[in-house]
Image (cartoon, rainbow, N blue to C red):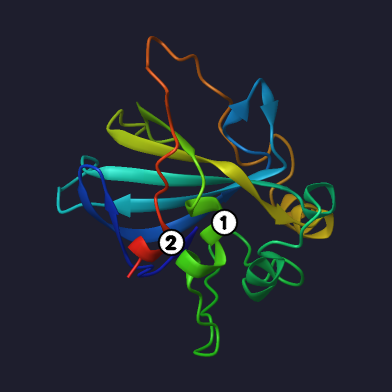
Amino acid sequence: VLDGNWGTLRLPDGDYIAKSLNFHFPSEHAVDGVLAAGEMQIVQRSDAKGTSGLAVISILLRDSDLLGQEGPVVFFDRLGFSSRLPVEGETIILGADTILNIGAIFAPQFAGPYWHYEGSLTTPPCSESVHWYLMQTAAGINNAMVNNFKSLFPSPANNRPTQELKGRAIVSSELAVGADEFS
């Protein structure tokens, strides 16, 4: 979990403040039954209290060589994915030179289509009050970074297994979230 003030995002039901980035390897979402190498989740909160008023924008992470693009590999490198990630319970403060504009870094993902559904948090208390936005365009990460993360969180890894839909509707949208929505 990478806590911080990542800006404000305007979603169809109001403004949300990006509070943290969570990483899971492998992904927690499957597309056509296939998990991605990883997933980055941008946890957003509206003005509501408790576990209501939550939205998560999720970006699947795939092998940058297979995608044919480097993608945000430099972003992951600056967070320590190439060298040293914090162990459980440890806090690492990013230096002032680590300015991270996720709106610009992930612009291709935010500009593309997404799937939306109402679901639950993937960690306790697993409240079913989350608007999920799964971006359909994956971002690149390299295998060494994935392996570095997995060395700290070995199998069964840090991802929740995929869940049954239980009648939830998944909506596909061509309307982009828009990188310029982060401010």
Q: Mark 1 and mark 2: span between their CA atoms?
A: 8 Å
* Residue type for callout 1: Pro
Residue in the picture at 78% in, 54% down: 64
Taking depth in this image into account, of 30 and 145 the one nearest to the observer is: 30
Can you name the residue that lies furthest to the bottom here?
97
Q: Residues within 10 Å of mark 2 (few under 14, many from 20)?
A: some
The image's mark for residue 179 is: 2
Q: Is residue 124 above or below residue 152?
A: above
Q: Which residue is drawn at 50% across and 69% down?
A: 104
Quarter of image, res 179: bottom left
The residue carrying mark 1 is 108
Residue at 55 percent across and 75 percent down: it is 92
Q: Judging from the image, what secondary structure is the residue with disc 2 in?
A: helix
Q: Is residue 2 above or below residue 126?
A: below
Q: Which amino acid does label 2 sit on?
A: Ala
Tally the marks.
Answer: 2
Task: Say which of 155 and 95 sits in front.
Answer: 95
Residue 103 picture location, percent across and down: 46, 65
Residue drawn at x 41%, y 10% as measured from the top left: 166
Tell me the crowding category of disc 1: few under 14, some 14 to 19, or many 20 or more residues within 10 angstroms, Cα based.
some
Mark seen at residue 132: none
Q: Is residue 171 left or right of residue 154?
A: left
Left or right of 96? Residue 73 is right
Residue 84 in percent (x, y) is at 72, 71
